[in-house]
Amino acid sequence: MESVLIAIGGNALYDKKSGNNLCPQMVRSVCQKIVQVYQSGYLPVITFGNGPQVGNLLDMAETSARLFETPVTLDTCVSWTQGEIGYWLTRELTRQLLEAGIEKPVMAVNTLVEVNPDDAAFQKPSKPVGRFINADEAQRLYDERGWIVGPDANRGYRRMVPSPKPLRILEAAPIRHLIDHEFLVLCCGGGGIPVYKKDGVFQGIEAVIDKDFTSCLLAKTLKIENLIICTEVENVCLNFGQPNQKALLRLSLAEAEQYQAEGHFGAGSMGPKVAAMIDYVRHGGKRAFITSLEKTVEALAGQAGTEIHAGS
């Protein structure tokens, strides 16, 4: 059975109406799709984002910081949401597998990812987390808390935090062991808990890692045959949102690199996803797709999504 790494965004699980970290119906929908992927003949390995969830916790932590001698740090918030989301997905996925008559173990792995503390990202925070705010609130949070706040996709302002590149996934070996024994693994939540080595010991560092880059790194490290990065749209497009919008269906590695170099994909939206897929295929990945969660089965069958491949 070939494996497929499916990277799911935190917004696919977030309750936008209530602001709660997780929406039960959305969790059910995500798990239904994972079960369908398994039933189509692939062993899913699931990574997931946590942008809105970690933003919620960070906001709560900073709001209540006066109550504690030591405030809750960003890396701890990443770990917290990894555990929370992993628990909900494990519970629901196990239930649905049993309902489908499938006896398959599920395990969530809290995952540490090494970064370089000298990464340039720490000098220029650029990763948006948490809720959208208006310009007046952005100024207030900058004045009161020293938050770096910036515009995000023309929808308002969000807090910006450092997002260094992932270097190494510390739990890669046990994750490989679980996959080899056909566990359905949930891992690398939120891009992984960022750590660095100091005096031979790993320390946490305040940052968030892009889950798509970590997903690519995991797929390369473990030689996972297929990689799907899920988005809110079915295809990558040229001129997105314009009258001359054009869906891209199948791209060679050279074509994808050319479009990326020409700036067709936004740095805060599709750009990092395309970059991660290019890196995966360049380093031996078999098939790479960008599509919506709803179209994952069809993408694997070659009937949906945008595929990036190494051939001409």
Image (tube, rainbow, N blue to C red):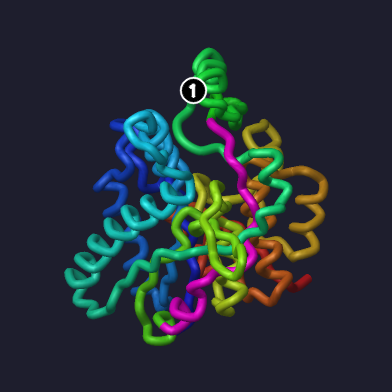
Depth check: give the residue in front, 199 or 211: 199
Depth check: give the residue in front, 184 or 162: 162
- Name the amino acid, label 1: Ile
Residue 229 in view: no
Q: Is residue 106 left or right of residue 54?
A: left
- Which residue is found at the position 75% from the left and 73% from the top? 311
Q: Residues within 10 Å of mark 1 (few under 14, many from 20)?
A: some
Tell me if residue 259 is in the magenta stretch.
Answer: no
**Which residue is disc 1 drawn over?**
133
Tell me if residue 169 is in the magenta stretch.
Answer: yes
Residue extent of the magenta highlight = 159-177
- Which residue is found at the position 32% from the left and 71% from the top? 107
Which quarter shows the N terminus?
A: bottom left
Which quarter shows the C terminus?
A: bottom right
Residue 202 placement (x, y as % from top left): 54, 64
User: Does 297 sit above or below residue 8?
Assistant: below
User: Does 193 sit above or below residue 132?
Assistant: below
Residue 182 placement (x, y as % from top left): 37, 83
Residue 5 in view: yes
Depth check: give the residue in front, 185 or 117: 117
